[in-house]
Image (cartoon, rainbow, N blue to C red):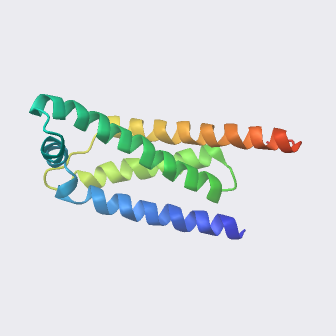
């Protein structure tokens, strides 16, 4: 029980962090591209490609971690964790539509949802391997 509470706290804090960052103009694609250009000296076209990869990788990892938090908080109910994460991703994209310089993207919701699925599958894989090594039958 105590472990689930900790995972809920982490999930809620992560949701707050996502809400904060997606609500700021500093998190716009054009701003991150300018930062990449300044830090790396890349041309605008090169920086645009790096920016795209960086931003999508951020979606995958952030919502992957959020999915893991919900998965653990919900006592390993994978489908429910995926649903909650995907719904949060959709509401976050909607939230972004009200922020100047930001846009909402259904594609980002799909990327977030896939990041969640991938992360949960990885965790389940390692949990199964751990249980097999310990001689425990897992779900």
| The N terminus lies in quadrant | bottom right
9 to the left or right of 105: right
Q: Nearer the viewer, residue 25 or 89?
A: 25
- Whether 58 is drawn above or below 5: the answer is above
Give the x, y percent position of residue 106: 32, 37
Q: Nearer the viewer, residue 35 or 125?
A: 35
Q: Does residue 31 show up? A: yes
Give the x, y percent position of residue 110: 40, 36
Residue displayed at 48% across by 65% down: 12
Q: Residue furthest left?
A: 44
Toward which corner of the image does residue 72 lie, by quadrant? Answer: bottom right
Q: Does residue 98 show up? A: no
Residue displayed at 49% across by 45% down: 64
Q: Nearer the viewer, residue 40 or 51?
A: 40
Residue displayed at 31% across by 48% down: 93
65 to the left or right of 124: left
| Count of residue discs | 0
Toward which corner of the image does residue 42 lie, by quadrant? Answer: top left
- Whether 1 is drawn above or below 118: the answer is below
Give the x, y percent position of residue 87: 45, 49
Residue displayed at 36% across by 44% down: 58
Toward which corner of the image does residue 22 lie, by quadrant? Answer: bottom left
């Amino acid at each position: 029980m105590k472990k689930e509470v900790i995972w809920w706290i982490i999930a809620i804090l992560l949701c707050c962090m996502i809400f904060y960052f997606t609500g700021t103009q500093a998190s716009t694609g054009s701003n991150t591209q300018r930062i990449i250009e300044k830090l790396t000296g890349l041309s605008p076209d090169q920086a645009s490609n790096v920016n795209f990869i960086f931003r999508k990788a951020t979606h995958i990892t952030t919502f992957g971690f959020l999915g893991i938090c919900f998965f653990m908080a919900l006592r390993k109910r994978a489908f429910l964790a995926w649903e909650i994460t995907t719904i949060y991703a959709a509401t976050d994209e909607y939230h972004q539509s009200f922020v100047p310089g930001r846009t909402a993207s259904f594609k980002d919701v799909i990327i977030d949802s896939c990041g969640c699925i991938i992360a949960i599958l990885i965790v389940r894989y390692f949990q199964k391997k751990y249980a097999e090594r310990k001689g425990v039958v897992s779900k």
